[in-house]
Amino acid sequence: MKKTVGAVLVLSALAAAGFFFFKKPPKTQYKTLKVERGSIASSVSATGTLNAVVTVQVGTQVSGTISKLYADFNSAVKKGEPIAQIDPALFASAVQQSRGNALNAEANLAKAKVTLADAKRTLGRNKALLAEGIIAQSDLDAALTAYESALAGVRAAEASVMQTRGALRQAETNLNYSTIRSPVDGTVVSRNVDVGQTVAASFQTPTLFTIAQDLTKMQIDTSVDESDISRLQVGQTAEFTVDAYPEQQFEGTVVQIRNAPVVTQNVVTYVAVIGVSNPEMKLKPGMTANVAVQIRKKDDLLKVPSAALRFKPKMDKEQEKGAKGGKGGRGVATESAGPKGGAQRQGGGKGGRSGAPGQTVYLLKGEDQKPVPVPIVTGITDGSFVEVVSGELKEGDDVIIEQVSQEKKKNGMGGSPMGPRF
């Protein structure tokens, strides 16, 4: 009997101990990362489009039907080389007609010169006869009038010759324009016509071909936000990636910063041109490039993850009451006193901006491993890490980046082993 009572007492004690043990609130857990030394490159991010440095749109100055094509997509062409032919029959007929008109005008000029010579001889003869008293003065006046009329006829014939010669040159020029030639050495990147298509150059010159002069040298036209444009300078190094080669990084140089603003839905941006070398011809016109222009780089500095600056511990009910009743902890006040979203801007997409001077991170200290605020002064950032200019942090310290929710853990691990109830 005594053994039974003792066993019952022991079981009761164990049950009470288990109840109080499991009733105890679970210990809060945190995710941490180490403070380390390394390099940080401050940069400005932007997107842009790859283009050839010189792109020429080839059109036509005459209208007609395309009869031949000598170039196609990706064709390498030389300056002056024929790339298309407009049916020249009408233009050749116009040249022949203009040439005939010019010959007729030259014949009329010769005829006018003969008439002038005859009138000049008659005038001289009448002057001599008038001096001898053989003819009247009226006869001399008539001869003078005929001479001046013949002289005017010569001038009119000369003007007609010039006019017909101009028309002939215009017809010959139109005939030459019927053969479309490449204006530069380059590669055809676009062809907008086919054989048999009629092109009209009445009001606006149609674009038949687009020729890139040299695809081994390209440029990226990037749109940079107005808040970042002051940090860009000609000559800065830029790195970029394209979707076609996501794992390869290309390099370029800022060659131009244009002053003309581009306003889109009240957002002001400026175009920065990045010069790119393309010797392997991997890059193609029209590709979208994600560019990061390196503004500043520091080596061998102490850096902290930017997520640590965004972390703020959750207070329990007793801490919340104390915070409402008192002036609040210094560490929390330091973080909230910074500029708008100062800690969050450390990991912003634009990157490269210096962090707010006064920031706060948290370390686990003491036997109970509670978060303790540590004020620091930050410098430049690359979006992932922030420079620690001064503070009590040292290399190897574990800074808190996230507080693990116990409720989520219970919800994730709890429940019946046989599955949810229905």
Image (tube, grey):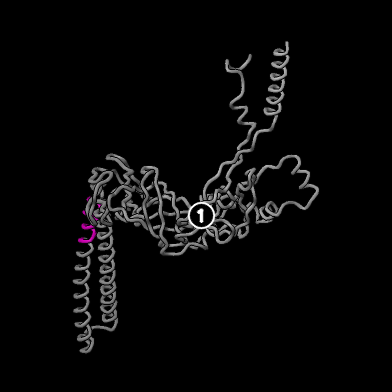
- Is 225 or 26 nearer to us in this picture? 26
User: Is residue 409 one of those drawn in magenta?
Assistant: no
Residue 192 image offset from top left, x and y in percent: 33, 43
Q: Quadrant of residue 53?
A: bottom left
**To which residue does mark 1 refer?**
395
The quarter in which the C terminus is drawn is top right
- Is 380 or 375 nearer to us in this picture? 375
The structure residue drawn at horizontal position 61% and vertical position 60%, both measured from the top left corner, is 357
- Is 420 or 45 nearer to us in this picture? 420
Q: Is residue 12 left or right of residue 231?
A: right
Using the rendered image of the protein, determine whether residue 383 is visible from the camera's viewpoint.
no
Few, some or many C-alpha atoms within 10 Å of disc 1 (few <14, some 14-19, many ≥20)? few
The outermost residue toward the top is: 1
Residue 56 image offset from top left, x and y in percent: 33, 54
The outermost residue toward the front is: 2
The structure residue drawn at horizontal position 65% and vertical position 56%, both measured from the top left corner, is 339
In magenta, the rendered stretch is 92-103
Residue 235 image offset from top left, x and y in percent: 41, 64
Q: In this view, does 351 lie to the left or right of 169?
A: right
Q: Is residue 371 left or right of residue 288?
A: right
Give, as a three-letter code, the residue at label 1: Glu
The structure residue drawn at horizontal position 50% and vertical position 63%, both measured from the top left corner, is 259
Label 1: element kind: loop
Using the rendered image of the protein, determine whether residue 234 is visible from the camera's viewpoint.
yes
